[in-house]
Image (tube, rainbow, N blue to C red):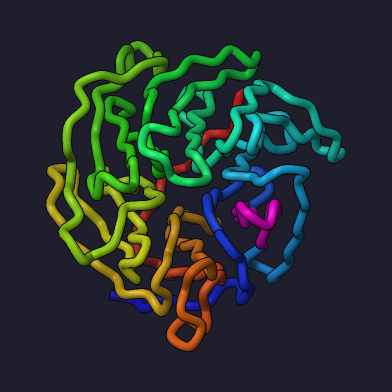
């Protein structure tokens, strides 16, 4: 098994949400509590940093250019020229946007959580390009990794404090619909002391990769929920993972400096990469 390399050495306080933008061939990720959206070009090492006006839980590419962002007070849009508008604004005192993912049909599934991590203080919403919004999962605590199987029939999801990766059946997937889920059940459980499931991604083999907060590792689970790979990382708090690069074979991992022991975690907050570790799936852009 390959060892992690440093793609970008930086001190992100709460790095999260790596996403490969296939149109621009860039990796996008966020530093939530510093309100920053980063990009990285693995070919020439080029980087950009954009500051948002609110804490930003996730940033994903839009089909027409620009970004869709999951902010403190809702979901917003940045156009390619940098102009901003709200798509769905729903401010709730003490709550912010967290991880998000684009479904195969181009809709955004956006999670929230309370700053105090109050049980049941967050939710998971489906937001379409015209701003139509439906709450899919109410009363979650820390809404995190969301991903779909290669055939679109299953959705994986982490509510981090449960120490469990859950799986759902996707309603209407056979006909191209991804508007609801049912049949929630445990896919894999993280044993005590191994950390907490944070962000996840699904590879071309249908295996689920998950970053373990306070677990200093990423793991891969086979489609039947069996652990078949575990890669130790040089940081205690990896937060999420995604495949990137021109051939989608490199696994990028965001990390957090927040709460990390500085002497034991000199790379905390950096963007890491596991080169050639698997085969990712092309991710859709947001339809709006």
Q: Nearer the viewer, residue 67 or 268?
A: 268
Q: Nearer the viewer, residue 161 or 241?
A: 161
Image side of residue 47 versus residue 175, left or right: right
Residue 51 in sight in this render: yes
The residue shown at (53%, 54%) is 16
The residue shown at (54%, 70%) is 257
Q: Nearer the viewer, residue 166 or 160?
A: 160
Query: In the displayed structure, would residue 107 be above or below residue 33?
Result: above
Residue 81: horizontal and vertical position, in percent?
87, 38
Query: In the displayed structure, would residue 30 be above or below residue 85?
Result: below
Image side of residue 110 versus residue 42, left or right: left
Say which quarter of the image contains residue 130: top right
Residue 147 in sight in this render: no
The residue shown at (37%, 75%) is 233
- Magenta stretch containing residue 279, yes or no? no
Location of the C terminus (image quadrant): top right
Image side of residue 81 versus residue 277, left or right: right
- Magenta stretch containing residue 36, yes or no? yes
Residue 171: horizontal and vertical position, in percent?
30, 15
Residue 168: horizontal and vertical position, in percent?
25, 27
Image side of residue 282 versus residue 157, left or right: right
Say which quarter of the image contains residue 285: top right
Query: In the displayed structure, would residue 240 be above or below residue 266?
Result: above
Residues in magenta, as a range: 26-40
The secondary structure that dominates the magenta segment is strand
The residue shown at (72%, 43%) is 54
Location of the N terminus (image quadrant): bottom left
Residue 12: horizontal and vertical position, in percent?
61, 66
Query: In the displayed structure, would residue 111 be above or below residue 21?
Result: above
């Amino acid at each position: 098994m390959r060892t992690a390399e440093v793609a970008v050495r930086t001190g992100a306080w709460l790095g999260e949400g790596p996403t490969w933008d296939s149109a621009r061939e860039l990796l996008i990720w966020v530093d939530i509590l510093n309100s920053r959206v980063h990009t990285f070009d693995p070919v020439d090492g080029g980087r950009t940093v954009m500051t948002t006006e609110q804490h930003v839980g996730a940033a994903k590419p839009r089909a027409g250019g620009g970004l869709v962002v999951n902010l403190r007070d809702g979901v917003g849009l940045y156009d390619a020229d940098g102009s901003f508008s709200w798509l769905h604004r729903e401010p709730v005192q003490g709550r912010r946007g967290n991880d998000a993912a684009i479904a195969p049909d181009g809709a955004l599934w956006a999670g929230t959580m309370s700053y105090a991590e109050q049980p049941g203080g967050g939710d998971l919403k489906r937001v379409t390009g015209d701003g139509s919004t439906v709450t899919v999962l109410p009363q979650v605590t820390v809404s995190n990794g969301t991903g779909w199987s290669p055939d679109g029939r299953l959705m994986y999801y982490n509510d981090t404090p449960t120490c469990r990766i859950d799986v759902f059946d996707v309603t209407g997937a056979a006909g191209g619909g991804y508007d609801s889920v049912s049949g929630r059940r445990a896919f894999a459980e993280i044993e005590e002391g191994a950390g907490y499931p944070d962000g996840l991604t699904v590879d071309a083999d249908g295996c689920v990769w998950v970053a373990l907060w306070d677990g200093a590792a990423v793991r891969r689970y086979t489609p039947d929920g069996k652990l078949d790979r575990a890669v130790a990382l040089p940081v205690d708090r990896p937060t999420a993972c995604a495949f990137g690069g021109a051939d989608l074979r490199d696994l990028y991992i965001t990390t957090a400096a927040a709460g990390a022991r500085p002497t034991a975690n000199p790379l905390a907050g950096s963007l890491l990469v596991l080169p050639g570790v698997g085969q990712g799936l092309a991710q859709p852009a947001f339809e709006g």
